[in-house]
Amino acid sequence: MDLRTARLILNALPGIGPIAYHRLTTALGNDPTRIFQATRTQLLSIKGIGKNTADTLQNWKQHFDPDREQQKLTTRNLHFHIPEDGPSYPPLLREIDDPPIGLYATANPYTHGTRAIGIVGSRRHTAYGLQMARTLARELAATGWCIISGLARGIDTAAHQGALEANGPTTAILGNGIDIVYPPENLELYRRIATTGTLLSEFPLGRPADKQTFPMRNRIISGIARALIVIESDLNGGSMITARFAADQNRLVCALPGRADQPTSRGCHALIRDGATLVTTADEILQEIGEPRTTPPTTNTPQPTLPLPAPANATEAQILQHLTGGLALSPDTLAEKTQRPIPELIGTLLMMELNHLIQKTPDGRYEIPTT
């Protein structure tokens, strides 16, 4: 058995994660092939390796077929990269406490070294958050920095899109097998990144996403990057987990401030209070990293836009007044502020949304579009 096959098997076996892998290889001469030569007694003598794990290792052929997995990889033009491969395995990942045993990747290998910046944020975003994610990603990617994110709904999607708009590099870290597109509405984005960038996953083919895979994915997002930017997150959002990983990995943690009265700002403001760097522009981020831009940012030619329709009546005007300043409010809150009955208000909100005066956020609130 060669080194790559050994890592491929160990990466797929149930109960053998990066921490158990590290314990096993440390005890057995830092050679993963020796794990399959070890006796049950030897395995059980290793700290943290119990009977179930020892049984899995002794009977690994019942759990995983490496030849079949490799055949699938070849058919789909996918690859399994290991740390011994060199630059195709992101170098900063080697520095974290629990690096992936291996990484499944699309045809284009990761080649950006340490020039990577992570951008993460809430799925329950505001129009402001989406706009800032795209703008920061676009400007950073235009200077050659690879934008790392998780292909999730909301801020992650906007970050990847911003990088692609600049024809810059972007890498998506998946919380499932690399042959699964999640969320499904990001199929076209998945394809674009696979063509011009890189998709990475530490999970075997066919592995669906679950509550365990997303935190594991998050540590890779922060682990690859020199810096992590959090754009909109509540206090208990997944982005806060990624920020904690980044701090533990000695990465620069940045946060974009938002409105004090918006739930989507609570996490970023908490990070700033705890010492994260407040950033609002790409130049500020590059300055913090220590590689300031030497040329002025490129500006995109503004696209002509049609003027938004004026409010049709006093109720619409009243609603717009309460949504000024970037506020996003629920129908109940708007009903309270406008003193309008809910049935009447819902109809008005629907018409305003159809006329592009307002837009609905993923959590059901309404806000004024940024463009």
Image (spheres, grey):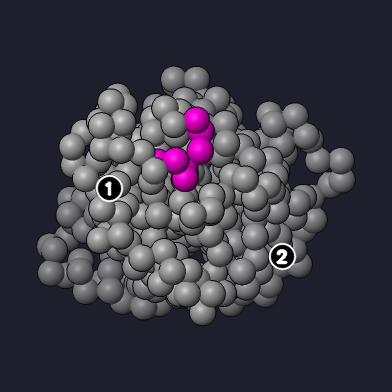
Residue drawn at (68%, 58%), measured in percent from left and top?
Answer: 169
Q: In the image shown, does 180 or 359 lie closer to the viewer?
A: 180
Residue 56 position, x and y percent, is: 25, 48
Q: Residue furthest top?
A: 274
Q: Answer with left or right where residue 85 lies relative to residue 55.
A: right
The amino acid marked with disc number 2 is Asn
Residue 80 position, x and y percent, is: 53, 59
- Give the structural element (helix, strand or loop) at label 2: loop
Q: Answer with left or right where residue 162 lies relative to residue 101.
A: right
Residue 58's label in the rendered image is 1
Q: Is residue 42 visible?
A: yes
Residue 327 position, x and y percent, is: 38, 48
Residue 226: image quadrant is top right
The residue identified by callout 2 is 167
- Give the structural element (helix, strand or loop) at label 1: helix
Q: Answer with left or right where residue 65 lies relative to residue 294.
A: left
User: Is residue 33 found inside the magenta-colored segment of the image?
Assistant: yes
Residue 88 position, x and y percent, is: 65, 53
Residue drawn at (26%, 53%), measured in percent from left and top?
Answer: 59
Q: CA distance from mark 2 to mark 1?
A: 48 Å
The amino acid marked with disc number 1 is Gln
Q: Which residues are magenta?
A: 29-35
Q: Is residue 182 above or below residue 10?
A: below
Looking at the image, is mark 2 or mark 1 earlier in the sequence? 1
Mark whose residue sits in front, 2 or 1: 1
